[in-house]
Image (cartoon, rainbow, N blue to C red):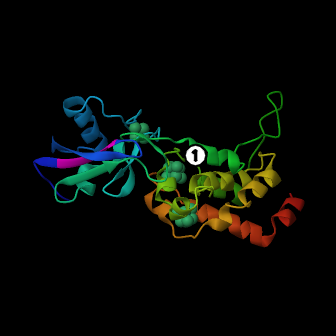
Amino acid sequence: METAKSLRVRVWRGGESGYWAEYAVAARDNQTVLDVVTEIQRRHEPSLAYRFACRVGVCGSCAMTVNGQPRWTCRTHVRKVVHDGQLTIEPLRNLPRIKDLVCDLEPFIDTWQRAGAIFQGRSDRNDPPQKVDPESISRKQADAALQCINCGVCYSACDVVYWNRRYLGPAALNRVWTLLNDERHSEHQGTFNKAFSRDGCSSCHSHGNCARFCPVELSPASSIAGLKKMAFRGYKARLAHE
Ligand code: SF4
Ligand code: SF4
Ligand code: FES
């Protein structure tokens, strides 16, 4: 933990090609990285582009790379990440850069579609709500992987995504795990087939960066391990007993 009166902040300006701009920002108590970016935009560089919405760790829109690591900036205190009074802030990695600290999230969002990670219910609005046993193993497994805020931090932290942009990635596969453990989902086999297609969960190298950096402490790596185990045990056999 470090304190300094002034922070030297390097910020990426531009798109895929650009340059590093340096700013001096006053160091304050309980200052977050998003506070620093906001101060730069308000006091030094009005044209600086960046994203945020809730400022309280709910919307997932403020993720950036801070001193080389992906972070949700509204909940990242400067004192925890600053090195020698310096911060380097750039967009999330593994995604196209649009302008300054804003990246294009479309390839990340697209992974949900490609992974079959879209919920499709068995009933319609006229049916009574389907009962789910909260104590069942499958429900507990699904519950442990919920609460993703779609921030893209895990996608940015994943080396396999870096090498292969077709890889479905940790967030979409974590979502698949919740669906395959959800008895209300009607497309189990279709979701399974997509998640195990080329560039699906068998491409995961299990090095765990996704779990290490997920700000809401999910473990996509564990979900993917569960998917692999599911395949090993014979998913069709499991379906036959449902
Ligand atoms: S465990 Fe798998 S999904 Fe997670 S960061 Fe590593 S390769 Fe990517
Ligand atoms: S799994 Fe965690 S790191 Fe990945 S998108 Fe969801 S909240 Fe963000
Ligand atoms: S601004 Fe919403 S999570 Fe950071």
Residue at x-position 40% and y-position 36% = 51
- The residue lying toward the viewer, choosing from 122 and 78, is 78
Q: Quadrant of ligand 1?
A: bottom right
Q: Residue furthest front?
A: 17
Give residue 85's position: percent from left, percent from top: 16, 54
- The residue lying toward the viewer, choosing from 184 and 69, is 69
Residue at x-position 46% and y-position 42% = 60
Region rendered in magenta: 8-13
Q: Amino acid at mark 1?
A: Pro
Give residue 6's position: percent from left, percent from top: 12, 47
Q: Decide if residue 28 is in sight here.
A: no
Quadrant assignment for the N terminus: bottom left
Q: Which residue corresponds to mark 1?
A: 107
Q: Is residue 90 left or right of residue 191?
A: left
Q: Is residue 208 left or right of residue 116?
A: left
Give residue 229's position: percent from left, percent from top: 71, 70
Mark 1 Cα shell of 10 Å, populated few (<14), some (14-19), many (≥20): some
- The residue lying toward the viewer, choosing from 143 and 58, is 58
Residue at x-position 56% and y-position 47% = 108
Give residue 86's position: percent from left, percent from top: 20, 54
Q: Is residue 79 above or below residue 21?
A: below
Q: Is residue 96 above or below residue 67?
A: above
Q: Quadrant of residue 193?
A: bottom right
Disc 1 beta carbon < 8 A from ligand 2? Answer: no
Q: Decide if residue 52 is in sight here.
A: yes
Residue 105 in the magenta stretch? The answer is no
Main SS of the magenta segment?
A: strand
Residue at x-position 64% and y-position 66% = 203
- The residue lying toward the viewer, choosing from 144 and 209, is 209
Residue 12 in the magenta stretch? The answer is yes
